Structures are given as C-alpha cells and as structure tokens.
Amino acid sequence: MKPIVAIVGRPNVGKSTLFNKLVGDRVAIVDDQPGVTRDRLYRETEWNGKEFVLVDTGGLEPRNNDFMMTKIKQQAEVAMNEADVILFVVDGKGGLNPLDEEISYILRKKNKPVVLCVNKIDNFLSQQDDIYDFWGLGFEHLVAISGEHKVNLGDMLDMVVDLIDQVDTHEEVEDGLKIAIIGRPNAGKSSLVNRLSGEERTIVSDIAGTTRDAIDTLIEFDGNKYLLIDTAGIRRKSKIEESLEYYSVLRAIKTIKRADVCLWMLDGSEGLTEQDKRIAGIAFEEKKPIIIVINKWDAVPNKDGKTMKKMREELYAELPFLSYAPIEFVSALTGQRTTKLLEHAEMIFAEYNKRISTGLLNTVIKEAVIMNNPPTRKGRVVKVNYATQISTAPPRFVLFCNYPELIHFSYSRYIENKLREAFGFEGSPIDIIFEKKHD
C-alpha cells in the first residue's frame, strides 16, 4: 500500500489549505469557521516520483469535549494511527499555543516521524522570530511554510519523502470497484459504510449533514476489493446559505463522476422526497449504474408480504427514468442484506461494461422494427438500416436511418426496452443515438 501522510493540528492553522495545495485540487472545504473539516479526507499525490496518500483531518482540540469536537478528535486519532509520517501544522503568525503543546504530547506518544510545519510564514526574514518558539515543542524536523502562497512546500515535501524512505511501508494494493454512496442527509450513508467496513471510518450521528466531504474507504469482501465513497449529504438548494454546503454539493457531483457504481440511499421510514429525485437525477445525468437502496427497513412499521412489492411499484411510477435500477431493502443498523449490495454492485458494473456483437444486435433491432415500425410523419417513412454498439460504460448504440430527426423520444424508449429484454443491462443506463445513414 502507498505510504500515508496525515496532516494534523488544532483548528484554523491552515491544514485544509495546505492539503489543497499539495493535491492540486479544491478537495477539502476551506472555511474560517473552526471545525469545518470534520472527517478524514484521503487523496493520492506524489513528490519527486514518490507516491503517497495524504490525509486531511479535523482540527484537534484535546480539551474540548463538545460532541463534534470529541468525534473529530477520534477521527484524527485514527488518521495518526494509520499514518507513516505526520505533518503537524502550527500557526506561525498566531504564535505558540497551549493546544499545540498538548497535541505535540499526543504525537510524541505515537512514536511516528513528525514534520513540524510552521504555517503562515510568508516572509522568512521578517518572521524569523515567530519560528524560534516552536523548536521548544521538541521535534527534530521543523520547516517554515506558507500553504496559502506555496512558500517552502518543496523543502517540506523533501523531508516527507526522506522520512517515508526510512519507514517500512505496506505492499501496494489496487483500488477496487469504486462505489459512491449518495443520498440526502440522514439517509444512513455513513452507517452503511461503517457496517460494510467494520470500522468507524465516518462520523455517524443524528445531526443532519455531519459528513461534509467525500470519504474513501477501501474494504475487502469475498476476495474482492471495494472503494466506498461516502458523499456529503446533498441538501436542497434553498438550504444552501453557507458556501460550505455549496462545496459539499459540488463535491457530491464530482464523487458521482469518480464512481463506477452508485448506491442511492433512501430512508424507508420517510419515503421519496423531491430532494431524493434531484439526487437520482444527478446520477442519471452522469450515466452511472445505480442501485436504489431503501435503508432503515427494520424501522418500517406494519410490514407484510406485499409492502416491498408496493414500494417498488410506487418508486418506479415516481421515477420512470430509473426503471432499470434494481431496488434493495436493507438496514445499515442491523446489517440486514447489506453485503448483498456489494455482490449486486459487481453484477451491474459488469452489465455497464457489456458489449453486444453487431450480428446479434441487428437481429434484435430488426425484430423490434418489424413488430413496431417507427411512426410515419408527413408522408415520410423512417427506415432503420443498421445498428452498432460504439462504446461501453455506459453501453452506447447508434442506429442508422434515413430520417433521424423524425424519431420520437417514445420510439427511442421502445428500442431501449427491447434491448433490455434481450440483453439485460440491469442497473445500467443505455444511450441510444439515431444517425443519418451514410451513403
């Protein structure tokens, strides 16, 4: 496995800004409110050909027992335990803080290589005096940097790479099937990740919107590897008053783009909302394979043998564009049917990458056209001549005809249904394009 480098420090010393500069993307949420970065955030990066995983953690306040701060502390603790090298970030402008001393005490107990990063030093000559106090924390490796202005980051990374070379790192593992777990706040996404990974990887609480960043968790099940991506709960636009929530929505959309398969979670005890439909729409527009997961099934009252069937029918009636998506009923809390989701994700990913031979495809299309000819318009008869599959993930088919502009959406849907009847494609979107026949 690639070495892990964790960024730790008290709130508001610039950890997320540093993280963003190092990975070259706006991944961590940067905001002046303390406690904004709540969960660990993982990204791969490299320096001088040396690849490693950088982990951004929530701000550490050892004496603050506020619920969220306690949870952040636990998360940072896990990140430090996982890390091969730790970047301990302090605020050079603000000076040495008693909290820095408490954190340095925690770090020394970890017995891990630490690089003390004195941040917000934009001008080394004029700010030299701001740095000396930090030597008193007792760390061998100290470097003055400015994350915001990328000052001295090269020297810092040189130290990191040197320390990595001195540490035994685990053997490399391949990332598995990337599964994005999407849904509105409180649908139980983090609980599902925790259930599948068997470790408290993301903060789970009843406060809606606890997970603000997308978190990656690599797990193994039945010999297969899976990368679970727990997205920030997507909120209604009207509720996005803070820039913070806006970035969370953008990130959820980016996460869906990254994923191989989406698990779209609904709260079985609440039913479908307009917000749920919007989230499903994002995954649909990105042409991603999708499994609809009805969570909290154990909490649904008065269930009988027909409850599942009735809910399936109601969902498909509300979401006709997702009629191809399988529906699973689970409980992240009890673990009921949760591992079945991984098997199902493997299966629909295979459907998403399925390729149909041209001969077989044309036989099916020909039969479909004989059974139901494209409608005639203004005396013009549409003739479908030939079909071919041009790509997979998603499966994309081109049907050549004489008047593609006359093909109605409903006929395209009819062809899609016939392809699904013949070849399956469960859980996978299909793209059908009608093009002018070439002479």
Image: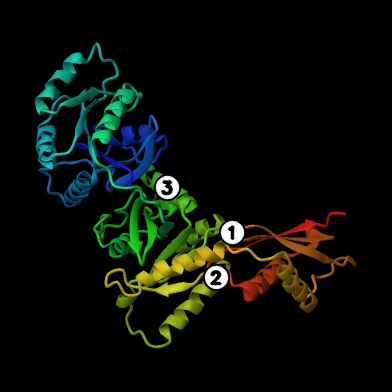
Packing grade of label 2 (10 A; few <14, some 14-19, many >=20) is many
Q: Nearer the viewer, residue 377 or 142?
A: 142
Residue 130, image x, y percentages: 18, 18
**Which residue type does callout 1 highlight?**
Pro
Residue 113 versus residue 371 in the image, above or below: above
Give the SS element for disc 1: loop
Residue 18 vs residue 376: left or right? left
Q: Nearer the viewer, residue 41 or 220?
A: 220
**Which residue type does callout 2 highlight?**
Glu
Residue 381 vs residue 236: left or right? right
Residue 239 versus residue 159 in the image, above or below: below
* Mark 1 touches mark 3? (CB < 8 Å): no
Q: Give the image quarter of residue 5.
A: top left
* Mark 3 touches mark 2? (CB < 8 Å): no
**Which residue type does callout 3 highlight?**
Arg
CA distance for labels 2 and 1: 12 Å
Residue 96, visible in the rendered structure: yes
Q: Nearer the viewer, mark 1 or mark 3?
A: 1
Instruction: Name the N-terminal-most of marks 3 and 2.
Output: 3
Kindly identify the residue that appears in the image at 20 percent across and 25 percent down.
142
Give the color scheme: rainbow, by chain, secondary structure or one colour.
Answer: rainbow
Packing grade of label 1 (10 A; few <14, some 14-19, many >=20) is many
Give the SS element for disc 3: helix
Q: Which residue is mark 3?
A: 251
Q: Which residue is mark 1?
A: 394
Residue 426's disc is: 2
Give the SS element for disc 2: loop
CA distance for labels 1 and 3: 22 Å
Residue 43, image x, y percentages: 36, 43
